[in-house]
Image (cartoon, grey):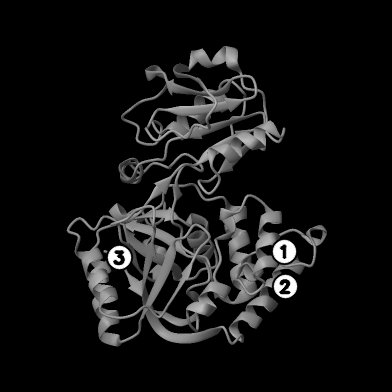
Amino acid sequence: MITLQPIPRALVPIDSAAAARVSAPNYDEFQGDREIWEALRENPDCVLAVTMAHCAVASPAEIGAGDSAESLARAGANMRHLVGSPLTREVRRALYCYEIVDPTRPGIRQIGLGGLGRTDEIRTASTPSGPIIRNEGVREPKARGRADLIEATSAIIGTVNNAVPDASGRFAQTLEAYADAREPDFEAADAAGNLHRIWLVEEPGDVSRMQHLISEEPEAYVADGNHRSAAAALLGYEWFLTVFFPAGRMGIKAYNRLVAAELPVGELGAVFDPILAPTPSPFQPERTHEIGVYSPETGWVAFAPREETFDPSDAAGSIDHAIVQDQLFARLLGFADAGDPHLTFVGANKDAAWLQNEVDEGRAGFAMTLAPVTMDQFVAVCRQGRLMPPKSTWFEPKIRSGLVMALL
């Protein structure tokens, strides 16, 4: 059973025009601070001025540390400006329906229910029966950084993306019926052409009905935002900002790698079998156990992991991202920690051609492209109580930041 509380004080855009100006991609969708600075130059009203305040400066040379006292003070000031802005308004005791219309997935309605989830329902060592299942390790410094931002702004902006089984389909059907009966309160498009639509649920009877609806789901799986929920728990808060989507309606795209090292061509045969001849075209695998590699010496080639290199009964260990980490990065290159600075994780908002260019420009030694993790793989890892390989699931479309924020 999952508990969802309406947000006592929610800050939202006043209309769709305001939503376009206030909302932004999440901080972790950018490849670096320079990209964030450029986004703020294009839209200085957006919520990145709060969530990434160290980039809300006059020039790239002034970009500082995200966790500095100066940056946190700027975040607090920018949040106060946002609260007082004519672009936003405050609503009381609201849940919300959130639909993401993805033109690349016609016929699939990704619609979910948002509000405040309980931190004590997250499954941890101290709450082993919690129905919200994490599948990623939490790094305390990263959670602390998010917690510091919450304290500096007196607001929770980062939203946790959760998937629920919705085995009967009733969860999605009820949300669709609610949305179809009324116009959205506001909507905003992102750079990829996805449309993000919000319906505020404020009428007490509707709130109670939606709370009962989500309580019927037996469990949920954290798709995005482990550190955002951990930040709330770190501060001792009972609640964290979240949206629950039906798992079958969510999309997972590729999560690739750039490596600052030479490709060990002569040793690859110990762990991989070649499956494709070199090709001049950038190669993005779509099938599990196809792995693309690009280096100036080899061009684009594809490999399959040898059967003896993984246990297919281990839901996490048999995912290609884990095989590559264990067999190539750790075994052949000595990068035992997935956080090794030689490794750069690149989400699906950068394609294989972009990766090739990074290598050709000398900013990496080689690139690896991996097929998207499937939803079945993701759920299996959660149900086995294991952790996903680091940076293996790029859920897309992602929740857009700044559409619904919780004021403390």
Q: Choose between 147 and 328: the one closer to the eye.
A: 328
Discs 3/1, front: 1
> Residue tagged by mark 1?
54
Q: Is residue 389 visible?
A: yes
Q: Which badge, 2 or 3, is on the more N-terminal residue? A: 3
Q: Choose between 172 and 153: the one closer to the eye.
A: 172
User: Callout 2: helix, strand or loop?
Assistant: helix
Q: CA distance from mark 3 to mark 1?
A: 36 Å
Q: Which badge, 2 or 1, is on the more N-terminal residue? A: 1
Q: Amino acid at mark 2?
A: Arg
Q: Amino acid at mark 3?
A: Ile
Quadrant placement of the N terminus: bottom left
Taking the spot 74% from the left edge, 58% from the top edge, the residue there is: 65
Going by the image, does 13 lie left or right of 149? Answer: left
Give the number of the disc on residue 2: 3
Q: Position of residue 66 (x, y in %)?
A: 70, 60
Q: Amino acid at mark 1?
A: His
Q: How many marks?
A: 3
Quick check: marks 2 and 1 in contact, CB under 8 Å?
Answer: yes
Residue 374 drawn above or below residue 49:
above
> Residue tagged by mark 2?
74
Q: Is residue 407 visible?
A: no
Q: Quadrant of residue 294?
A: top right
Q: Position of residue 371 (x, y in %)?
A: 42, 36
Going by the image, does 375 lie left or right of 77? Answer: left
Taking the spot 81% from the left edge, 61% from the top edge, the residue there is: 62
Discs 2/3, front: 2
Going by the image, does 94 lie left or right of 79? Answer: left
Residue closest to the far front? 280
> Badge 1: how crowded within 10 Å, few (<14), some, or many (20+)?
many
